[in-house]
Amino acid sequence: MKSNLTLPPSVEERLSGWMRIKERYQSQAPAKARPRPTVTISRQFGCEGFPLALQLQKLFEGVSGEPWSIFDKELIERVARDEQISLQLLRHLEEPVRFLEAYGFHPRGKVTTDEAFAKIAVHLIHFAKEGNAIIVGRGGAILCQPLDNCFHFRLEAGLDWRLGSLVRRMGLTAKAAGDLERSQTKARDHFVREHLGVNGTERPLYDAVFSNERHGVEEIAAAILGYVKCGWKGEGIGRSTP
């Protein structure tokens, strides 16, 4: 099956869309609030994580009748840097360190004392707790393990396929794709070890691991939708409300 090679929309566009969703939810009466699921996507570099997120967003919005947001490295870091948005997000939370500790992460333990990552981690967990979120990378599967509304999935593929994907999607030469894959894989592995103290490739972290080489994003997204519909204990995602 041909893969979806759609590139990520701009951070500004997605930030504006997410803020509109936030305003809509905040205008609802508390009695209407209900649990919502979140999906995290981990991937080997060169796999099509963001195209998969876009396909999932389309499917989940169609089934649930509600908007879903995609959070990746650029959007999460932008929110963490924006003081006005940070205050809006954190006004109901405890001090960030205690918030992280409540979910099993300790500044002097698995999570680094690095202030920038601590902010990112707090925001990421907040997005996940709210639900209707698709989180791409940033250690989401690891940070959100304690949250019972989260489902975790990973994309893998052989090196040759991933290099070919980079060449097709980014217009790189074979050499440039190889150099980029090596540098980014090294940086990602270091990020996970440094900030989270675990191996992000460990299979028990994930509900399912998919071969992006053997299956396109449409197939994988349909399988994830089915998994979440079967496994979700809350309301919604295609289930009628009593």
Image (cartoon, rainbow, N blue to C red):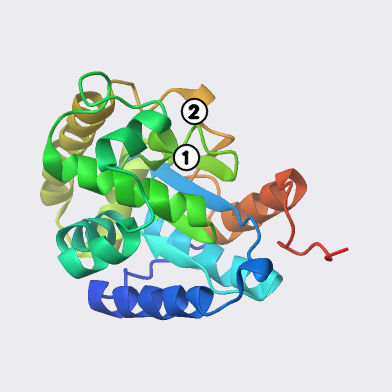
Q: Residue 87's spot in the image, x, y percent?
A: 25, 62
The tally of labels here is 2
* Residue 205: mark in rendering: 2
Q: Nearer the viewer, residue 202 or 16?
A: 16
- 43 w.r.t. 63: above or below: above
Do the residues under discs 1 and 2 have CB atoms within 8 angstroms? yes
Q: Residue 169's spot in the image, x, y percent?
A: 29, 63
The amino acid type, in three-letter code, at marker 1 is: Arg
- 89 w.r.t. 142: above or below: below
Distance Cα–Cα, label 1 vs label 2: 9 Å
Q: Is residue 1 visible?
A: no
Question: Residue placed at 52% from the left, 68% from the top?
Answer: 68
Q: Is residue 65 visible?
A: yes
The amino acid type, in three-letter code, at marker 2 is: Leu
Residue hosting label 1: 154
Number of residues whose C-alpha sits closer than 10 Å to that of mark 2, classed few (under 14), some (14–19) or many (20 or more): some
